[in-house]
Image (cartoon, helix red, strand yellow):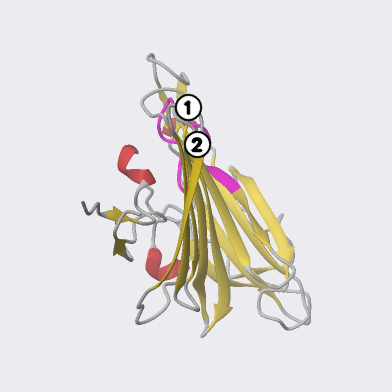
Amino acid sequence: MKKKIILITITLLQLSSFCQSKTTILDEEGDSIENLIPKEWEILSTSTGDLNKDGINDLVFAIQNTDKNNFNIHDGPGRDTINLNPRILGIYFRNKNGQLIKKLQSDKFIILQDSPTMDEPFDGIEILKNGILKVDFHFWFSAGSWSMSSHSYKFRFQNEKFELIGYDSSERHRGTGETTDYRINFSTRKMNISRMTIDENDIETVKEESKTFKLDSLKSIQSLGKPFEWEFIKFNEL
């Protein structure tokens, strides 16, 4: 029997919609992260490294507004306060004079912790030694879901965009212990899937599959918009 699976959308089916709107325009340039962060915004994560391979360290950061008017009080299960303030991803290239020049601002890609039973989904950003920008998320709910998962998006600056070249995820059912791992290389159009199941005798069975897929062009941070909403492929269950 065929089962339709939609990668990169599977987790957010259980989440409420995110309503982040653009509230602030980051400065076009500055000489430090301190004078780029708007007043009343806080840093969630930051990293430095050479994104454009010019030998100079660049800067990425994720920030969130602290406006108390956007805190919602909740009297049910889970957290008693939900912070619905907008979040921003900022990417700046540093030039040879030491100035930071804005290359990208995304008001959608850093998702909110907008459910009272939801753990903080954003795990941070990192510029790797090879210049790849990695953005990590995880999903865990104290109520309403038995699933937990971790996710990494990997972007490379090329063609004047931050193009998505890789995506890794690991999904686990907390009740059964069964797991599914995805490793996707968008540059080579190859995907590896590994599923581990446990039978009634606690015997583990692992099934692995490698696939190739067609993709006309690479997605970017700009064209993705929000994470987890791109239905890029459908395939059969192992």
What range of the chain is rendered magenta? 111-123
Which is more N-terminal, label 1 or label 2? Answer: 2
Judge by depth and name the residue closer to the eye, 50 or 229: 229
Report, in whole angstroms, how far the alpha carbon at label 2 lies from the one at label 1: 53 Å
Residue drawn at 58 percent across, 77 percent down: 157
Q: Within 10 angstroms of label 2, few (less than 14), some, or many (20 or more) residues?
A: few
Q: Nearer the viewer, residue 226 or 180?
A: 180
Closer to us: mark 2 or mark 1?
A: 1
Quadrant for residue 97, please give it. Answer: bottom right
Total numbered labels: 2
User: Dominant secondary structure of the magenta stretch?
Assistant: loop
Look at the image and say whether residue 38 sits in the magenta stretch: no
Quarter holding residue 30: bottom right
Q: Is residue 51 above or below residue 123?
A: below
Measured as percent of width and height from the top left, residue 150 is found at: 53, 45
Q: Is residue 120 visible?
A: yes
State which quarter of the image contains the C terminus.
bottom left
Asked if residue 201 is positioned above or below residue 108 in the image, the reply reads above
Vertical side of 79 occupied by 65: above or below: below
What's under tag 2, amino acid-wise?
Asp
Residue named by callout 2: 67
Q: Give the residue at mark 1.
A: 201
